Image (spheres, rainbow, N blue to C red):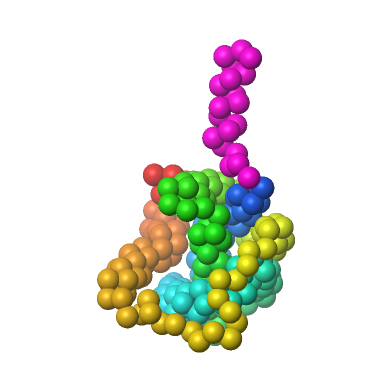
């Protein structure tokens, strides 16, 4: 084999994960995060400047949705232990896609809030199931490597989504934004379908076994969780404040929102 062939083979071996389950999970992650990149880049612009909701209400709705969804992490973990993560994750993503289609018809605040809460809960459940799946795919350093690869795929998917979102921002018509949201809905459903092809992983706890809240008695775990929740508030700044600042307070083209989002993701 030539040096070029060896180099290509090495790149391929590093870029494509080994094992059917890891490849399926990576593909599902790529599809899902591509849609996330589409949505997070234009959501606040669409619902404030096109639909007509106030920026403060949009930010409040996203904050409430994030807080409510966080409370479902532990219950989602218990569900994963008793039923296995594959089917629950797949169903959650499909339902999230359905809610995204519902969001297309939302024009008032309360429905916007409720749909975002529902999507936040389903997104948290599917993410918890993904983490449970990673825990079952490897041990020790191998598990860390799988998680790191999924993070790299996530960053690539979001970056790619923000690039396509820039097209809608440049066109700046209601139909352009609506097509983007519809595209995000399709990616949720497609990602759920792909994830359903993962091998079934046996539950680790009997369904009738009492639920343990041992983790909630771990002060260090609770402290780390609280700090992570505070740190996650930057997503509101990223998805609400920055896009509105670019569009309303600067003379930069709207598609610069896409550029900033992409730089933030890859940095």
- In the rendered image, residue 101, in percent from the top left (x then y), is placed at 68, 70
> In this orientation, which residue lies closer to the viewer: 1 or 72?
1
Q: Residue at x 38, y 79 (%)?
A: 214
* Residue 152 visible in the snapshot: yes
* Residue 165 visible in the snapshot: no
Quadrant in the rendering for residue 190: bottom right
Residue reaching furthest to the top: 2
Q: Residue at x 67, y 69 (%)?
A: 87
Majority secondary structure in the magenta region: helix
| Residue 109 to residue 193: above or below | below
Q: Residue at x 56, y 37 (%)?
A: 15
- In the rendered image, residue 75, in percent from the top left (x then y), is placed at 50, 80
Quadrant in the rendering for residue 110: bottom right
Q: Residue at x 55, y 76 (%)?
A: 205
Residue 120 inside the magenta-drawn segment:
no
| Residue 58 to residue 184: above or below | below
> In this orientation, which residue lies closer to the viewer: 97 or 220?
220
- In the rendered image, residue 91, in percent from the top left (x then y), is placed at 67, 71
> In this orientation, which residue lies closer to the viewer: 68 or 202?
202
> In this orientation, which residue lies closer to the viewer: 191 or 8?
8
- In the rendered image, residue 207, in percent from the top left (x then y), is placed at 60, 82
Task: Locate the C terminus by quadrant.
Answer: top left
Q: How many marks?
A: 0
Magenta span covers which residues?
1-19
| Residue 153 to residue 119: above or below | above
Task: Locate the N terminus by quadrant.
Answer: top right
């Amino acid at each position: 084999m030539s040096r070029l062939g060896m180099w290509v083979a090495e790149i391929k071996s590093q870029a494509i994960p080994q094992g059917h389950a890891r490849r399926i999970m990576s593909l599902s992650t790529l599809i899902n995060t591509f849609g996330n990149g589409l949505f997070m880049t234009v959501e606040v612009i669409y619902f404030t400047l096109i639909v007509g909701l106030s920026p403060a209400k949009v930010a409040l709705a996203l904050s409430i949705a994030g807080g409510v969804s966080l409370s479902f992490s532990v219950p989602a973990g218990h569900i994963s232990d008793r039923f296995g993560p594959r089917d629950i994750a797949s169903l959650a993503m499909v339902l999230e896609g359905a809610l995204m289609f519902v969001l297309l018809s939302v024009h008032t605040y309360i429905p916007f809030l409720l749909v975002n809460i529902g999507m936040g809960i389903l997104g948290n459940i599917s993410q918890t199931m993904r983490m449970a799946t990673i825990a079952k795919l490897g041990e020790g350093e191998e598990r860390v490597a799988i998680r790191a690869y999924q993070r790299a795929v996530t960053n690539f998917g979001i970056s790619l989504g923000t690039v396509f979102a820039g097209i809608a921002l440049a066109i700046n018509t209601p139909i352009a934004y609506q097509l983007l949201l519809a595209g995000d809905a399709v990616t949720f459903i497609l990602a759920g379908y792909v994830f359903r092809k993962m091998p079934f992983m046996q539950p680790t706890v009997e369904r009738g076994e009492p639920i343990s809240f041992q983790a909630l008695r771990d002060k260090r775990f609770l402290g780390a969780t609280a700090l992570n929740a505070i740190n996650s508030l930057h997503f509101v700044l990223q998805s609400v404040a920055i896009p509105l600042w670019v569009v309303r307070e600067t003379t930069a083209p709207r598609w610069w929102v896409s550029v900033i989002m992409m730089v933030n993701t890859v940095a």
